[in-house]
Image: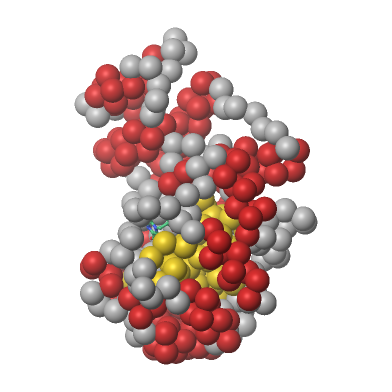
Amino acid sequence: MTFPLGNKPLLFLAPLAGYTDSAFRQICKNWGAEVLESEMVSAEGLIRNSVKTLQYVHFDESEHPFGIQIFGCNPLTMAKAATLLLPLKPDFIDLNMGCPVKKVVRKGAGSALMQTPSLAEKIVKEVKNALQGIIPLSVKFRSGWNFQNQNYLEFGLRLQENGADFLCLHPRTSSQMFSGSSKWEQIKILKQNVQIPVIGNGDIKTPEDAQRMITETNCDGIMIGRGALGKPWLFAQCSELISTGTYHPVTQKEIVKTIFAHLDKALLYKSEYVVIREIRAHLCFYTKGILGGAELRNQINHTESISELKAIILKGFSLI
Ligand SMILES: Cc1cc2nc3c(=O)[nH]c(=O)nc-3n(C[C@H](O)[C@H](O)[C@H](O)COP(=O)(O)O)c2cc1C
């Protein structure tokens, strides 16, 4: 991967467990997301039951450049998992050192690794060796464990020293989870101090936010997560604003076309029964703020057929 792309920073879709499956990623790609990534998968799971766990990292040819994110805290297990993933031909492997969820940090993985930087270094070293220079290695991490321990800069420098090819910083502490706001100043400081590319992440909700993050931090790429839920066109709007100084609002027709494309893509991979249920979470976002949204969501949550769902959506968006 080349950073930046031309003179424009790369646009990444963030890993969002439970949301960024192949169908949603492809929709984001159609709307201009330039780099996609799997949600985090357990390195131990990959080793214990690779057939089942590999299903979680399935990606389509059209998704390149694509990264697979793994989590864990044992350097050899992480390295073995990376080796197992190589035949799938991802474009990079990403190490999760930012997840604040109890189930993950309790075992010393995710953001808990920011408290054990020597172990984090060993993981990077082992995985880097396992990848044999075939594909790059990135690490996604946070500001630090808590307000008193914001070691992102020292941590990032140590990751670089041990072989990370690029870094992604979500500048909130682990104990903050998702509260407060991310401190973009830390992305700027990290970028000023490392030689490898830095991707900035956190709280990009509008094209103006994207442009502001780039200007304020000089980052090599921006990563958008929650802001893309129900708004995958945000990527196209960011690109347009960055290159032309303005952007187009999305029309009702384009929204419905995107929802239908999302449904059709999902049906390529999952049964109607599963898609009807999984799409509800996305439809909550797609229908946010529309007139009669609550009633529309109520109808969406009670239908059992895709054709009926499409009719409900057309009516809800006043297109029939
Ligand atoms: C529902 C949800 C699931 C997430 N899953 C992952 C994950 O699997 N791996 C990861 O590195 N970060 C994960 N994150 C964190 C996001 O990738 C991102 O760092 C965070 O949401 C901040 O970016 P945003 O403000 O653009 O959403 C998740 C966040 C949310 C809200």
Q: Quadrant of residue 66?
A: bottom right
User: Can I make out residue 178 in this image?
Assistant: yes
User: Can I make out residue 96 in this image?
Assistant: no
Q: Is residue 229 left or right of residue 32?
A: left
Q: In the picture, which quadrant includes the N terminus?
A: bottom right
Q: Quadrant of residue 46?
A: bottom left
Residue farthest along the top direction in this orientation: 320
Q: Nearer the viewer, residue 136 or 118?
A: 118
Q: Position of residue 3 (x, y in %)?
A: 69, 64
Q: Position of residue 250 (x, y in %)?
A: 57, 27
Q: In the picture, which quadrant includes the C terminus?
A: top left
Which residue lies at the image location 50% right of the left edge and 27% below the top edge?
A: 255
Q: How many marks?
A: 0
* 5 up-or-down from 264: above or below: below
Specify the color scheme.
secondary structure
Q: Position of residue 121 (x, y in %)?
A: 46, 87
Q: Position of residue 118 (x, y in %)?
A: 42, 89
Q: Nearer the viewer, residue 148 or 251?
A: 148
Which residue lies at the image location 47% right of the left edge and 62% below the top edge?
A: 171
Q: Quadrant of ligand 1?
A: bottom left
Which residue lies at the image location 67% right of the left edge and 43% below the top edge?
A: 239
Q: Nearer the viewer, residue 33 or 171?
A: 171
* 66 up-or-down from 33: above or below: below
